[in-house]
Image (cartoon, rainbow, N blue to C red):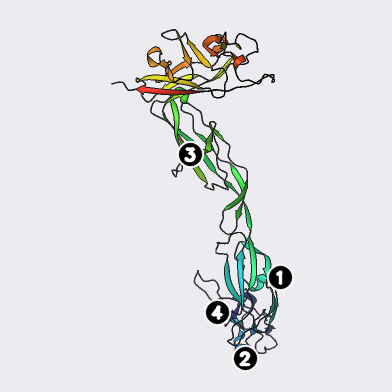
Amino acid sequence: MSASYVKTHTTVHFVNKDDSTKSLGKDTTINGIVGQDLSISGNAVNANGYYWTAPNIKHATLSDGPEDKAARTILTKPLVTMPKDSKDDTPNVINVVYSRPVGTLPYEIVDDDDPHSAVNSKGTIPLKVNSRYDYTLSSIVNDVDIPDGTYPVSLKNQTGIVTENSDNQVTNDAVIIHVKHSLQKVTTEFTRNIHFVGPNGMKGLPQDVSQNPEITMHKDAVDGHIVDAQGGFNPVNVPNLEANGYGIISVKDSAGHDLGDHLSNNVFTWDDVVKDSRADVTVTVTYGKVTKVIAPDFDFGKIQMGSPEFYGEKPKNVEKITGDLRVINSVNPDAKWYLKAKIENDFMPGTPSITLYNADQVKQYTRTIDSQSKDIYNSTDWNNAPDQPGVWVLIQGGMEAHMPEIAQLNTSNLQKANLDFSKNEQEFHGTITWQLDTVPVS
């Protein structure tokens, strides 16, 4: 003699008859065989059946009339073939129905991290009148749906007894639930590119620079914005090519944003991912032809008290020239130009002037720069730099090493100047203002 059993299972739902849109608990599956009596706090079952007690659910009352008990008692049936998109293949279903009134004790969720987010909300907790409540941070989550990505940090008005007035309106102050945003740690690859462009035929255009670092960061679990990050982007050298006739005319990203303020001292600095969270950004640095003067810095060293230079009897040769004196007019290389200069000598005693000596071009002559603006050089006396149309090198830094008289500082008798002779050493600075005028070729 032999026997076999056919397996099946039963799905149990926990239903709130006062609000069918919200389940009172997670569905349960009971595995068994076909032909069993199955009861969940329902009618009695035979010796071969199974009887379970319905769970207690906080603030809810089990519906326990004869019809309810009968509905919670079934005879299990075989599984059936269901469509592929069906979540269950059993005809065995028990609905355990409770009564839990909706909309009694009010609550309010306050987002401590963002007062304007959708997390800030209000609702009600289904507590019956005259019931007592005493919530904690761990228990409030059982009766209130805390928004995803947040966690409660403090409560207010969390203890009391539900009361109502003569109009059956609850009079309790709302339970205030303060929440903060959770953080999610992620690692993502970011791309940052610098693309250089210039006029056709431009020499010395830099190569593009690309970097693809992986950056570990914390993201806000509510809105996804980056809170902090470890690692970032390397700054990028952006060559100054003005000495070759090309200046930077724009620094923009692909969205058209002007990022010129990110370029300082020929270095481009990227925003970190907290400020600019875009995964892939390309910035285009555009060079263009320019018209301008590039001026050097003249250092005339020290004038010793009692020396001929101190008494204004002899000029002081320059000791160091940093940078070149260049005229740039790559916009119109054939145009005539005139370079004017004057000394802003408000900070220098002795009515200073500077004599510049030229011995390398078409003519040999000297020019003096003083407090009056005057022509110092013009295109008639100078040739273009080799292979650089529109670039004129008037003085080269370093020339002072073999020609110290190329720039000389002249002063009047410093003994008559308003100086503090009690000091061993005094330092003075003056500014040369350069003005370039061009005349187009007709």
Q: CA distance from mark 3 to mark 1?
A: 52 Å
- Identify residue for label 1: 136
**Residue 363 vs residue 173: left or right?**
left
Q: Amino acid at mark 1?
A: Thr
Checking the image for residue 65, the label placed there is 2
Using the rendered image of the protein, determine whether residue 38 is visible from the camera's viewpoint.
no
Give the class, few, some or many, for how many residues have Cα within 10 Å of label 3's Cα (few <14, many ≥20).
many
Give the CA separation, mark 1 to mark 2.
35 Å
| Residue visible at 48% across and 14% down in the picture | 368
**Residue that numbered label 4 is attached to:** 20
Quarter-of-image position of residue 272? top right
Circle nearer the viewer, 1 or 4: 1
| Mark carried by residue 81 | none
Identify residue for label 3: 283
Q: Residue at x 62, y 92 (%)?
A: 66
Q: Is residue 310 above or below residue 3?
A: above
